[in-house]
Image: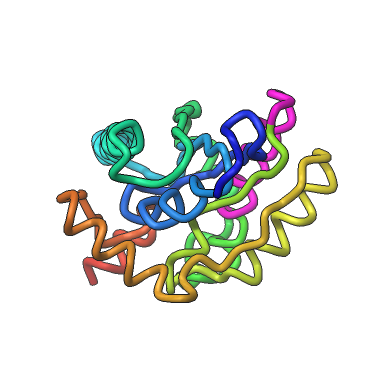
Amino acid sequence: MHRAANEAPAVLLHSCCAPCSSYCIEYLCKYFRVTVFYYNPNISALEEYRKRAEEQKRLIAIYNEEIDEGSREGHGIDVIEGEYAASDFFDIAKGYEDCPEGGERCFRCYELRLERTAREAASRGKFSYFATTLTLSPLKNADKLNEIGARLGEKYEVEWLFSDFKKKNGYKRSIELSKEYGLYRQNYCGCVYSKTLKEV
C-alpha cells in the first residue's frame, strides 16, 4: 500500500523527452510525488524543441487521466517547462564541438541541465530529491550522470536520487510505452552535433 500523496516524498525529475520519461515516470510515481522538469537548451532547433516539449506534456496528461481513472497506479504528476535558451548550450559546447558523442561535450551538457534542475529544486523548497531520465538511455553514461548529480546535490542541498533507469528492462519498457501511446521518438539526442553524426 502506497503512502498518501501528501506523505510521499517529492522529486523533481529532469526529462529529456517523453519516450525516455515514460518508464521513469511510471516507476517513480508509485513512490514519489513527481514533478517533471523539461529543460533542454541542447535541442538546437526551436521547432524540434517545441515538438518534444508538447509530447512530454501530452504523455503526462495521459498518465494523470489514467491515475484518476484508477487504471494506472501512482500519484499525480506535475510538469514545469524551463526556459529555452539554445545559447546556453552553445556556450558550454564552445571548444568541444569536435568531441565524439558521449565524450566531454556531453558531460558538460549533463552538467548544464542537472545544475539547472538542482537550482530549480532548491529554489522551490518542496523537493526532497532531484533526478534525471537521462540514465535510461543506453547511450548515456549513468555513472557520470550520478557523479555530477551527487556533487550538485551537495552544492544546492537537495538530495540526488541515484538511478540507472535502463536496468531491469527499463529501456525496453520505454519502447513498449512509446508504441502504446504513439510517442514521437527522435533518432538523435537533440544537439546539432548529435544530429550531424546521425546524418553522416
Say if residue 60 shows up in the picture: yes
| Residue 27 is inside the magenta segment | no
Direction from residue 148 to residue 177 in the image, left or right: left
Which quadrant is home to the C terminus?
Answer: bottom left
Direction from residue 159 to residue 49 in the image, left or right: left
| Residue 119 is inside the magenta segment | yes
Q: Residue at x 45, y 34 (%)?
A: 77
Q: Residue furthest top?
A: 124
Q: Residue at x 80, y 39 (%)?
A: 156
Q: Residue at x 30, y 59 (%)?
A: 195
Q: Is residue 148 above or below residue 3?
A: below
Direction from residue 181 to residue 99 in the image, left or right: right
Q: Position of residue 35 (x, y in %)?
A: 52, 34
Q: Position of residue 153 (x, y in %)?
A: 77, 47
Q: Position of residue 89 (x, y in %)?
A: 52, 43
**Quadrant housing residue 23:** bottom left
Q: Nearer the viewer, residue 67 or 60?
A: 67
Q: Nearer the viewer, residue 108 or 185?
A: 185
Q: Is residue 147 above or below residue 58?
A: below
Disc count in the image? Answer: 0
Q: Main secondary structure of the magenta part?
A: helix
Q: Position of residue 127 (x, y in %)?
A: 69, 34
- Magenta residues (range): 109-126
Q: Residue at x 38, y 44 (%)?
A: 43
Say if residue 46 shows up in the picture: no
